[in-house]
Amino acid sequence: MQIALALPALLTSLFVVAVERLPFELTALPWRVGTPYRRAAIAQAGTRSLLLTHHPTPWRQPGTTTFTDAERRLLRRSTEHVVISATTPPTALPAAAQLARATARTLASAGLLIDPLTGTTQPHPVRPTPTHPVAEPAKFHLGDGWLGWDVRVHDDATCPPWNPADTGTCDALSVTSRGLSRFALPEITLDGAACAHRLCATDLLRTVAHRLVADQLAFLAAHPDARLRLIDDHLRIGPPSSLSVRLTPCSTTPADLGRTGSIRRLKIAPTTGGDQITCLRVGPPSGFTGSLNDWLCAPHPTPALAA
């Protein structure tokens, strides 16, 4: 069977930089953006492709964040913030999102760079690392901070509190992606795993996310005018080893991310594309006779870093 994914005419990717005070006039920001993004920043600044908006008020994060104590202290000292947004057709991805983040990173030396979609911060430019250099990388890698993960343990779960590693009875874990909607994709969730399988559940979803984004970008490049995309409800990933997952459309609220009891099944492959699928539940393929925990423990391929 197939699942129909509606492709919006426009998508917005935005970042927030919270600062104690602006170090320079905001109009000068595009000229300070590093290569290879400076020319595009100068040309597109002030348009919907790169909109810079100054707010002389502290920034307040709606929803869940994963800030460190030091980042929270910095945020409390901030008295104003700048929103950097890029609103473009999906065919402009991933370059449009990279341009917005490159511009935000240029200002972030004066404050805290926040990705509201993932609920995380980006590395501080004055403390570069080998994996996160000061400049925005020219080549797109999904693993370069474009995804976040909402990991929860359900209050009403059957996991014995005295032995959470007992995978035979524990089904308390729920893991949901944060950030796939930036690429016109539903978020993916895996629910009902044992608490002890948090790492492998996240790794498996990361593998699926890499494949979904890579296929999405390839489809958009080949079909720039498409408003609907059909994908198989069984996704095979490999080589070197073969991974097969089943995707089930679901709809969740932020408070109920991934919880089996709160998932509302949607119609598979609507002919008009009118149903907005916001979530895809990931699970074992049809015909798998073991439990979800058995499936998670099986060997899975390592995702390629470039999506």
Image (cartoon, helix red, strand yellow):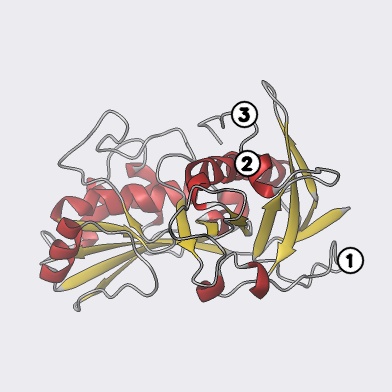
Q: Residue at x 54, y 60 (%)?
A: 172
Residue 166 % position (x, y): 54, 49
Instruction: In the rendered view, tell whether residue 299 sits above or below residue 191.
Output: above
Q: Residue at x 80, y 51 (%)?
A: 233
Q: Is residue 190 in view from this perspective? A: no
Dot 3 surroundings within 10 Å: few (below 14), some, or many (20 or more)?
Answer: some
Q: Position of residue 271 (x, y in %)?
A: 89, 66
Distance Cα–Cα, label 3 vs label 2: 12 Å
Q: Residue at x 84, y 63 (%)?
A: 268
Of the residues shown, which amino acid type is indicated by label 2? Leu
**In this view, 233 is above or below 237:** below
Q: Amino acid at mark 1?
A: Thr
- Which residue is nearer to you in this view: 260 or 246? 260
Helix, strand or loop under label 3: loop
Q: CA distance from mark 1 to mark 2?
A: 33 Å
The answer to whether 286 appears left or right of 248 in the picture is right
Image quadrant holding the C terminus, namely top right
**Quarter assignment of residue 135:** top left
- Mark 1 or 2 closer to N-term? 1
Q: Which residue matches tag 2?
A: 296
Q: Callout 1: 10 Å neighbours few (<14), some, many (20+)?
A: few
Question: Which residue is found at the position 20% from the left and 76% from the top?
Answer: 58
Answer with mark 3 or mark 2, whichever residue precedes in sequence: 2
- The residue type indicated by label 3 comes to Pro
> Badge 1 is on which residue?
271
